[in-house]
Amino acid sequence: EWPDPEALRDVIAELESYPPLVFAGECDQLRARLASVAQGEAFLLQGGDCAEAFDAVSAEQIRNKLKTLLQMGAVLTYAGSVPV
């Protein structure tokens, strides 16, 4: 139970307005790729902020972080000769 149900509704509505970070199909693909990592057939690159502030979440900021991770993945793929 929340002491202020109206405040809870406002927060939920705000969170629902943000763009999704992942889609269901991407979760399935991640499971398969993590299996390859566990078997030593691929490399796992994990990155991101330790804690994002809710007022600092936008499609542009997410896109910029993803772009950086993709560039790092490309370098690691080339250097390690395994999928990242």
Image: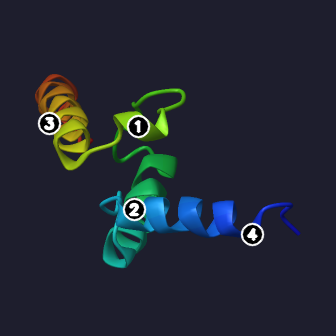
The quadrant in which the N terminus is found is: bottom right
In whole angstroms, how far apart are the C-alphas of marks 1 and 4? 21 Å
Q: Secondary structure at mark 2?
A: helix
Q: Position of residue 48 (x, y in %)?
A: 40, 31
In whole angstroms, how far apart are the C-alphas of marks 2 and 1? 28 Å
Looking at the image, is mark 1 or mark 4 earlier in the sequence? 4
Of circles 2 and 4, which is in front? 4
In whole angstroms, how far apart are the C-alphas of marks 3 and 1? 21 Å
Residue bearing mark 4: 5
Looking at the image, is mark 3 or mark 4 earlier in the sequence? 4
Q: What residue is rendered at 24% in x and 34% in y?
A: 65
Q: Position of residue 17 (x, y in %)?
A: 36, 64
- Whether the residues at callouts 2 and 1 have beta carbons within 8 Å, the answer is no
Q: Is residue 33 visible?
A: yes
**Quarter location, residue 23:** bottom left
Classify mark 3: residues with Cα within 10 Å, few (<14), some (14-19) or many (20+).
few
In whole angstroms, how far apart are the C-alphas of marks 3 and 2? 18 Å
- Whether the residues at callouts 3 and 4 have beta carbons within 8 Å, the answer is no
Asked if 19 appears above or below 25 in the picture, the reply is above
Q: What residue is rendered at 74% in x and 69% in y?
A: 5
Residue bearing mark 2: 30
Q: Amino acid at mark 1?
A: Asp
Of circles 1 and 4, which is in front? 4
Q: Secondary structure at mark 1?
A: helix
Q: Amino acid at mark 3?
A: Lys
Of circles 3 and 1, which is in front? 1
Q: Nearer the viewer, residue 25 or 55?
A: 55
In whole angstroms, how far apart are the C-alphas of marks 3 and 4? 38 Å
The quadrant in which the C terminus is found is: top left
